[in-house]
Image (tube, rainbow, N blue to C red):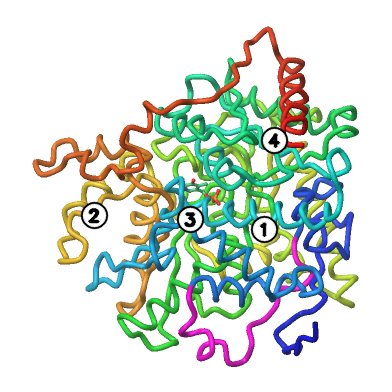
Amino acid sequence: MNHVRMSSHTSSQRYLSTRGGSYGLSFEDVVLKGLASDGGLFIPEEIPSLPQDWQTSWKGASFEELAYNIFSLYISQEEIPAEDLKNIIKESYSTFRAPEITPTITLDSKRNIHLLELFHGPTFAFKDVALQFLGNLFEFFLVRRNKGLEGRKREHLTVIGATSGDTGSAAIYGLRGKKDVSVFIMFPQGKVSPVQEAQMTTVLDANVHNVAVEGTFDDCQDFVKALFADPEMNKTHKLAAVNSINWARILAQITYYFASYFSLIKSPNLSPDTAIRFVVPTGNFGDILAGYFAKRMGLPIEKLVIATNENDILHRFWRTGHYEKNEVHGKEAEGGFKDDGVKAHAEGVKETLSPAMDILVSSNFERLLWFLAYQVYGEGSADERRKKAGNKVKAWLYELRRKDGFGVDRWVLDVAQRDFESERVSDEQTVKTIKDVYNWTSSPTHKSYVLDPHSAIGIAATLRSVERTPSGTHHVSLSTAHPAKFSKAVDLALKEEKEFNFKNVLPKEFVGLEGLPRRVINVSKSDGLEGVRKIVIAEVEKELTEKR
Ligand SMILES: *Cc1c(COP(=O)(O)O)cnc(C)c1O
């Protein structure tokens, strides 16, 4: 093959760890590894910039073509040939119900408020955009490695994850039926919403294993961690994770920022330099981090607005420059810092109406910290600067582990505030926003729009941002889930509306779902970790025997 190498094709895009422990990794390495061996996260050594003529040459592109244009700036053709990458993308988005994949609709044309709907994938949540792609990538890499090999010689990937609902179903739908991959998803028995449990357990593909654990979500997570740390397990199985720290997930999410930009440029036919703000309901900082990459690549985003629920560690960071696990800080709390890392009165995660955003710390924030450090403490050659950034990140995270928090210099906060603003939205405001939007959207195209609670947090933050920005500013608020997935909040907000009937928002895919046959393995308290280990080993063994 003899490809003409355009200037836009960084033919040797390489990756490094945010903690400085590894450099020069390939895309395949970082996707299959997930987490760096020094505990850091993978980022590209350089953020690619857009081709000079992108605004004209990408304008008429479909979602899939945009994805290809963007991904090929991050993945060299030596690693994934153009045709293969195109096929992976095509297959990944063939499962979406909307032709535009992620449509942008206008909720309020007077105030220029738009909604980027990210829930048209198989599990009705935004995580599908990334996990459909990740599943196909895993399969592509494994099948290529296994070319010409038979039976036990084939490399087999065992994906293990824990979920409290949302990630689990998207991961299962991303990996179902994939060759050379098994997936085990653990969830706390009886503690996942009925719709989400049905979504996961009614997937009957032989490579999908739902494990219902008697215990809490934390118990499930502890099992996952223990399995990843188990030397025996690692000797016999190639383990992989699909949680939000996998680089391919961030990459896949960059596409919809571009898709939404072009959608607005076309209709309502904006000038290409209109100020556009993206507002993102945020938990682990993965969704909005993709927006940061889009902005750094050159997409004209005026600001990214972080919208948190009452678990507001990010919001507090943007206010104060302190990244701290709980709200008690200042002199008194500092007195509570102990060398063993235990802080007095540490609070846990608060349960809210937007559970997919209930976090104590945001894992992907570490990636932004690296770029902030690189910009602020940058002196010397690119290699020296990278090294310094890695050291800085390592020091911050060390403090986070030891003292439950750390503070950054004013310069760092300044740089962070150039690209981002933040808002915190309470449960009460979430419910009110669902109700308000239901009543003010009366355009002929979108009558009585029903928001899910996560998306409502985005709109609540948008309304505050509208108040402080010039009137020509456009806001795109990201809608991360379908309202039928989170019926509790929707019901709270709309039960008194005369016209409202929950049945009308229920997609046909959800009707009768709970009555379908299920496959799930139960783990009791007394089975414990050993029980889970045995299940993983036996189930993979069964798959390998039955398939060959
Ligand atoms: C995962 C999730 C979020 C949070 O996204 P992050 O990338 O973790 O910030 C928001 N809403 C829904 C519905 C989600 O599933």
Q: Which mark is residue 160?
A: 4
Q: Secondary structure at mark 4?
A: strand
Q: Which residue is mark 2?
A: 449
Foreground: disc 2 or disc 3: 3
Contact, mark 1 vs mark 2 (Cβ under 8 Å): no
User: What's the amino acid at mark 3?
Assistant: Thr
User: What's the amino acid at mark 4?
Assistant: Ile
Which residue is the extreme one toward the left? 498
Tell me the quarter of the picture where residue 74 sits: bottom right
* Structural crowding at the residue carrying mark 1, measured as other residues with C-alpha within 10 Å and reported as few (<14), some (14–19) or many (≥20): many
Q: CA distance from mark 1 to mark 3?
A: 18 Å
Q: CA distance from mark 2 to mark 4?
A: 37 Å
Quarter the C terminus occupies: top right
Q: Which mark is residue 95?
A: 3
Q: Secondary structure at mark 3?
A: loop
Q: CA distance from mark 4 to mark 1?
A: 17 Å
* Mark 1 or mark 2: whose residue is earlier in sequence: 1
Reply above or below: 111 against 358: below
Q: Which mark is residue 248?
A: 1
Residue 71 at x, y percent in the picture: 65, 71
Reply above or below: 315 against 240: below
Closest to the observer: 143 or 351?
A: 143
Q: Secondary structure at mark 2?
A: loop
